[in-house]
Amino acid sequence: MVKTIRVSEEYHEWLSAHKEGDETMEETLRRMTRGPHPSDVAGLLTEQEADNAKEAVNRLRRGDRDRLDAARSAFESEDAGE
């Protein structure tokens, strides 16, 4: 299955400038983002392990969001006190 992604013209030009040889855009993106090829990681985790890993990432992201919100609130309350 092929998916299309929308990127700005500037990003497309930047990415094209970083292509090596006869690389496809996918190959360039994978190299630039260090993403593994799906076939390289297929089957490494069971479905349950993958679900657990996703939930762990979501918990970390929620924690980051909570800390950011707390910091924002602290700054806003300091500004209101001036």
Image (cartoon, helix red, strand yellow):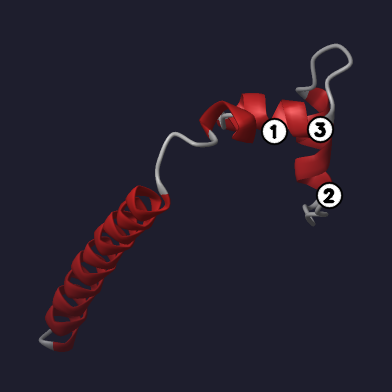
Which amino acid type is marked by label 1?
A: Leu
Residue annotated with mark 3: 25
Tell which circle, 2 or 1, labels the residue nearer the N-terminal end: 2
Where disc 1 sits, the SS reads helix
Residue 30 at x, y = what percent? 65, 30
* Residue 37 seen in the current view: no
The image quadrant where one finds the C terminus is bottom left
Residue annotated with mark 1: 29
Tell which circle, 3 or 2, labels the residue nearer the N-terminal end: 2
Where disc 2 sits, the SS reads loop
The 10 Å Cα crowd at callout 2, few under 14, some 14 to 19, many 20 or more, is few
Q: Nearer the viewer, residue 46 or 71?
A: 46
The 10 Å Cα crowd at callout 3, few under 14, some 14 to 19, many 20 or more, is some
Quarter residue 57 falls in: bottom left
Vertical order, 75 against 55 (above or below): below
Vertical order, 44 against 56 (above or below): above
Where disc 3 sits, the SS reads helix
Which amino acid type is marked by label 3?
A: Met
Residue 4 at x, y = what percent? 83, 54
Disc sitting over residue 66 in the figure: none
* Residue 76 seen in the current view: yes
Q: Nearer the viewer, residue 14 or 62?
A: 62
Residue annotated with mark 2: 2
Which amino acid type is marked by label 2?
A: Val
The 10 Å Cα crowd at callout 1, few under 14, some 14 to 19, many 20 or more, is some
